[in-house]
């Protein structure tokens, strides 16, 4: 197969080319090159989805080197959903960044942005465990770079902390993969699944891999690196990190979990992941309720939302295929809704901070009058995060509720329900601050660009519309593929 | 596809689109905003009348959209839906007019009217919902869109009231969600009216179904302000008067009561619920709430607080009627849904007029106000007499049917509840009327607005007069085809004779 026959390699080639070009080109060409790159990425993503929908999962061997030696790419329904999700979120964040960043910051932003996107696509499409590792490392470096370039003391500190945590996570993952290679003699996910046998080595390997990925996903209690990194970064970066980057390690965890049948063999580990999820929901929500810094509220909300996604694991039980299907659909829908809503919320929060010029909640008084559109965007994203209808977050919560009821695990119902009340508490707390009156005549606020308000609103509205159009992503992830076959 | 099928969606969309346009308009475009608002309210009334014609022909337009595997959003106009949708759209028109007058020259009107329309859109969704899932979605949307109205003034007190409101309603919403999800887990999606499906479930899991019934009623009971879930309603009184009208008459408490009607009649079916012994606890709680609300109303010195506790008591009349097995009780409950709306909205308009025109908030300040504001006071008197249940105002019709319904259901003690509550109603309304009409004025009014109008501005006065007249007409011409009573009878007929 050559490069021309499939849009799949383009999803890696374009962002890598974008990274190189934006590094080399003079400033006035940079944004134009990026715009062109984003458009061609969208086209490639749509073309590939069309192929996957029409003719099932696609396999592509880079440079015609076949599997065990070459770099194999693979696209099934789940991968397509993630490709489309990152295309949508990244392009809107890029549009936001174009107005948000000053020219000298843009010089650093674009190459890192393109590296980030390339590594995300690499992870979504990877067919073997080593490519996943490469993607994850690239992603870490790009993400740490993006956090660091806010370039104040706190963000540097946060990025160093983030770097250490991420490297530790990758190390665990790499060790696990090495052990797996030793035990099974292959790195490809499909042949691993075929030749899978449990033994002490496999168990240690799985533990290392799961542990490493949990650290990178910032699962409670390994989440402490996340709030400073996501709360301290520049706004478009925070949005990208919370909406997409943490999803990468989660996606890998899911692939391993289902394709290698881990859920069948380690049911106690499933329950443990659920308990960590519950811990994340309550601790993240509680901490979000106590923050005074707007972006830290949003960052802690990410910690809590990761918890909801983890609830999917105890519900993927071998015995009940109905409940497992619902859990799979609910978990992925939750992830998608969170990506849209959290990106929208971070961008809206960034707009509010531009208006007030201060990061703290106290400064928000009078905002609901001055910037109704931005408050509306913040509120809509909040509705989805609270899981109130109508929204993607609600539909996802409904599926998870149904799955818990069907599999008789009623305690997750309690967690889901109390968790939403807690999220309502921290989101309405922010909302109430914006309703306070300033008490002085006239508002003296700065004004964000219209394009910045509209990008935030678009993402938030999308998270609401997902509640009405949930069937589309659900059909996409239910297309036949290696993951669907391995589901109970 | 039949064109009538798009009518329910059109009814919903008129307020939703109005809300979106209003949010987009700059704050200063007051005239345009008011025109859009009024035009949308009138258009909705026309659509409702068209839809009524269709429903009378026993034709029930329906649209649906599959949102999750096996689960659809359904909008369906049946006779019961039209009862609530009709009430809300009539009251929306007058409340909008009133709000335009009330908020003249106050800030943040764009935000206020936007959420106001969104509120009505959710109410339309609630009334036209064709299954519990759709109902739940709009029920929660109603919570979300009323919160900004409750905290509209942005003061400490209103933010506190907003917090109380959220704690109650979101808590109730979550209980309702668990009930709806559990019902779905047992029996899949049950469209309203498919009571055979529920009957089969009750046969298999009687215990679970009773628990689900309790969850659903408790979740709905929060908005219907049933004891002990009524605490938010008096606190929310700090909101502007049009919002109180919306909470008490047009949308919120009615949404809760209407939901209970749906659960009892269209999910479980009245016969099944009665056989399973699910109804008598409801009768007990409703009776207690009626007396408790009236008793607390008696102790209030603030006009709006007294009215709020009166609502707590009056909404439970609806619940009482629903819980009595037999067509007469049903008619009483349903017709009170309309009558209470008309009378209570009148009372709140008048209370708002007193506060806006003369700065009167407390009952003892009302001395002699009848001479200063005769028309407002006349409307107030009509509403109050209706609440007491004096013929020929509409409230009398409700109480008559509730009483005969209780006898029919063999619950004679309910008559005692009705009589004592009427006495309590008289005890807390008649002294107010006495102060208004017969006591002499005590000194200056607390904060008099200078207008060239004798009573108060027309935009504040006319809605109150119209709704007062409507509640009188609903009582006087109760037997005509157009009256709320006839519509309630029609619904009851279709409910008991499938």
Image (spheres, rainbow, N blue to C red):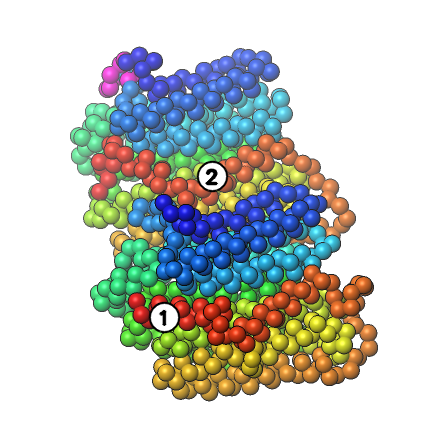
**Gap in Å between the C-alphas at discs 1 and 2?**
44 Å
Point 24% across, 19% down: residue? A67
In the rendered image, is residue A161 in sight? no
- The question of residue A65 being in magenta is answered with yes
Q: Which residue is mark 1?
A: B493
Left or right: B178, with A360 as reference point: left
First to last magenta residue range: A61-69
Chain on which label 1 sits: B
Chain on which label 2 sits: A
Occupied quadrant, residue A480? top left
Point 73% across, 77% down: residue? B370
Number of numbered discs on residues: 2
Does dot 1 land on a helix, a strand or a loop? helix
Q: Are marks 1 and 2 on the same chain?
A: no
Mark 2 residue crowding within 10 angstroms, few (<14) / some (14–19) / many (20+):
many
- The question of residue B78 being in magenta is answered with no
């Amino acid at each position: 197969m050559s490069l021309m026959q499939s849009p799949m390699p383009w999803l890696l080639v374009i962002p890598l080319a974008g990274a190189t070009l934006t590094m080399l080109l003079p400033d006035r060409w940079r944004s134009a090159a990026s715009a062109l790159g984003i458009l061609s990425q969208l086209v490639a993503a749509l073309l590939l989805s069309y192929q996957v929908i029409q003719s099932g999962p696609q396999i592509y061997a880079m440079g015609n080197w076949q599997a065990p030696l070459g770099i194999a790419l693979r696209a099934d329904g789940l991968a397509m959903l993630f490709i489309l999700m990152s295309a949508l979120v990244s392009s809107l964040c890029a549009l936001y960044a174009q107005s948000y960043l000053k020219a000298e910051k843009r010089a650093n932003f674009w190459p890192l942005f393109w590296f980030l996107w390339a590594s995300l696509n690499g992870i979504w499409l990877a067919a073997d465990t080593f490519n996943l590792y490469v993607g994850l490392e690239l992603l870490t470096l790009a993400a740490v770079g993006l956090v660091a370039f806010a370039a104040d003391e706190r963000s540097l500190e946060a990025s160093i902390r983030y770097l250490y945590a991420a490297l530790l996570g990758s190390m665990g993952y790499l060790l696990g993969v090495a052990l797996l290679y030793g035990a099974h003699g292959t790195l490809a996910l499909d042949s691993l699944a075929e030749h899978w046998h449990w033994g002490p080595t496999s168990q240690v390997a799985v533990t290392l891999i799961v542990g490493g990925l949990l650290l990178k996903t910032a699962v409670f209690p390994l989440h402490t690196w996340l709030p400073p990194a996501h709360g301290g970064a520049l706004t478009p970066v925070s949005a990208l990190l919370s909406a997409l980057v943490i999803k990468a390690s989660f996606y890998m965890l899911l692939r391993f979990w289902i394709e290698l049948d881990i859920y069948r063999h380690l049911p106690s580990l499933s329950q443990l992941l659920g308990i960590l999820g519950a811990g994340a929901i309550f601790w993240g929500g509680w901490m979000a309720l106590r923050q005074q810094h707007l972006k830290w509220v949003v960052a802690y909300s990410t910690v809590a939302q990761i918890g909801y996604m983890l609830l999917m694991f105890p519900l993927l039980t071998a015995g009940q295929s109905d409940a497992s299907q619902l859990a799979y659909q609910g978990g992925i829908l939750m992830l998608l809704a969170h990506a849209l809503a959290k990106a929208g919320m971070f961008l809206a929060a960034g707009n509010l901070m531009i208006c007030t010029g201060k990061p703290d909640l106290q400064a928000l008084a009078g905002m609901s009058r001055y910037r109704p559109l931005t408050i509306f965007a913040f509120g809509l994203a909040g509705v989805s995060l609270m899981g109130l209808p109508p929204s993607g977050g609600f539909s996802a919560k409904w599926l998870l509720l149904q799955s818990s009821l069907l599999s008789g695990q009623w305690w997750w119902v309690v967690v889901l329900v109390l968790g939403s009340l807690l999220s309502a508490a921290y989101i309405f707390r922010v909302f109430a601050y914006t309703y306070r009156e300033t008490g002085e005549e006239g508002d003296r606020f700065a004004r964000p660009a219209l394009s910045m308000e509209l990008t935030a609103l678009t993402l938030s509205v999308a998270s609401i519309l997902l509640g009405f159009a949930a069937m589309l992503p659900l059909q996409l992830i239910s297309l036949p593929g290696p993951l669907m076959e391995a589901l109970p | 596809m039949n064109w009538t099928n798009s009518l329910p969606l059109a009814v919903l969309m008129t307020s939703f689109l109005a809300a979106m346009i209003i949010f987009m308009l700059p704050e200063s475009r007051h005239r345009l905003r008011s025109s859009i608002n009024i035009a949308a309210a009138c258009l909705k009334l026309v659509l409702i009348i068209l839809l009524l014609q269709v429903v009378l022909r026993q034709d029930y337009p329906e649209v649906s959209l599959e949102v999750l595997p096996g689960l659809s959003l359904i909008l369906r106009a049946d006779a019961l839906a039209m009862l609530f949708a009709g009430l809300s759209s009539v009251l929306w028109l007058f409340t909008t007019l009133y709000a335009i007058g009330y908020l003249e020259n106050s800030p943040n009107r764009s935000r206020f009217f936007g959420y106001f329309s969104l509120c009505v859109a959710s109410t339309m969704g609630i009334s036209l919902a064709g299954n519990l899932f759709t109902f739940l979605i709009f029920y929660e949307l109603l919570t979300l869109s009323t919160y900004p109205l409750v905290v509209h003034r942005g003061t400490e007190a209103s933010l506190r009231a907003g917090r109380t409101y959220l704690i109650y309603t979101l808590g109730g919403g979550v209980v309702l969600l668990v009930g709806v999800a559990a019902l779905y887990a047992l029996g899949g999606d049950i469209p309203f009216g498919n009571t055979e499906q529920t009957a089969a479930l009750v046969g298999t899991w009687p215990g679970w179904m009773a628990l689900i019934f309790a969850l659903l009623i408790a979740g709905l009971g929060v908005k219907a302000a049933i004891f002990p879930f009524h605490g938010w309603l008096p606190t929310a009184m700090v909101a502007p008067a049009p919002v109180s009208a919306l909470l008490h008459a047009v949308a919120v408490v009615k949404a809760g009561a209407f939901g209970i009607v749906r659960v009892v009649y269209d999910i479980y079916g009245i016969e099944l619920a009665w056989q399973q012994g699910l109804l008598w606890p409801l009768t007990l709680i409703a009776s207690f709430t009626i007396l408790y609300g009236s008793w607390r109303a008696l102790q209030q010195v603030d006009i709006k607080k007294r009215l709020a506790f009166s609502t707590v008591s009056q909404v439970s009349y609806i619940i009482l009627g629903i819980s009595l097995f037999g067509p007469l009780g049903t008619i009483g409950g349903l017709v009170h849904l309309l009558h209470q709306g008309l009378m209570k909205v009148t009372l709140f308009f008048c209370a708002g007029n007193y506060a806006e025109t003369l700065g009167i908030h407390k009952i003892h300040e009302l001395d002699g106000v009848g001479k200063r504001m005769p028309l407002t006071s006349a409307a107030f008197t009509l509403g109050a007499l209706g609440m007491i249940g004096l013929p020929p105002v509409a409230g009398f019709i409700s109480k008559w049917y509730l009483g005969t319904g209780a006898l029919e259901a063999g619950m004679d003690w309910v008559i005692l509840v009705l009589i004592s509550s009427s006495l309590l109603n008289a005890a807390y309304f008649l002294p107010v009327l006495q102060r208004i009409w017969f006591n002499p004025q005590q000194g200056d009014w607390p904060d008099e607005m200078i207008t060239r109008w004798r009573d108060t501005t027309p935009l504040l006065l006319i809605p109150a007069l119209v709704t007062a007249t409507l509640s009188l007409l609903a009582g006087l011409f109760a037997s005509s085809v157009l009256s709320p009573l006839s519509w309630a009878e029609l619904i009851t007929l279709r409910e008991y004779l499938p």
